[in-house]
Amino acid sequence: MEKIFTVNGEQRTFRFEPRETLLTVLRNNGFTEVKSGCGEGSCGACLVLLDGRLVNSCQVFAATAAGKKITTAKGIGTIHNPHPIQDAFSDTGAVQCGFCTPGMVLASYYLLQHNPDPSDEEIKTALDGNLCRCTGYTKIIEAVQLAAKRMGGYG
Ligand code: FES
Ligand code: FES
């Protein structure tokens, strides 16, 4: 099948099989910042925003995302023009292998949009669907606190 998607503000036409997931279709079309981890909805590596809602793209059929607005981590900031959350992850050393980072950044972005001044406990709750094998999470929590401070409480 062939359908039109809006990814990071750009309209794209993707061809795919009816049962392919949004994760597979995004990665097959170059959006490799969306990481493929567990494939069963429990690691958060594949997070995207779908019409502003955080979803694990491995759990969504691509066909159901057609016509909706999809935002990946590159849609909120790039290496040359990073979002304050991405800068904060880098500045606090919250990135090691980087595999979890796009999902962590998107989950943090969603949190700060809805709660611009979160407590450590609220950050832990917001990120509890995102697994990181490297950092021990402390620096990730620091990164989100730093981003919240730099963003002045306006997610
Ligand atoms: S790959 Fe989707 S939640 Fe792990
Ligand atoms: S930085 Fe390696 S999994 Fe999080």
Image (tube, grey):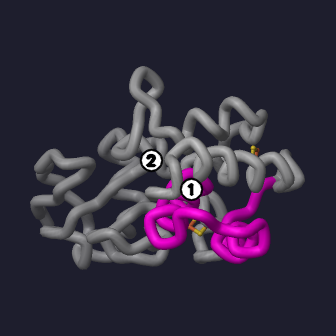
Q: Left of 54 or right of it: where is 125?
A: right
Identify the residue position indicated by label 2 in the image: 73
Instruction: Identify the residue at image location x=45%, y=42%.
Output: 32
Residue sitting at 53 percent across and 70 percent down? 115
The disc labelled 1 sits on which kind of residue?
Answer: Gly
Q: Name the residue under label 1.
A: 103
**Magenta residues, dominant SS class:** helix
Does the image show residue 35? no
Q: Which amino acid does label 2 sit on?
A: Ala
Residue 86 belongs to the span the image colors magenta = no
Q: Which residue extends farthest top?
A: 80
93 to the left or right of 1: right
Whether ligand 1 has any atom under 8 Å from the Cβ at mark 1 is answered as yes
User: What range is drawn magenta here?
Assistant: 103-132
Determine which of the numbered discs, if any, sits on residue 119 in the image: none
Q: State which image quarter holds ligand 1.
A: bottom right
Q: Which residue is drawn at 40% across and 48% down?
A: 27
Whole-percent x and y of residue 129?
A: 67, 73
**Residue 19 position in % (x across, y down):** 33, 76
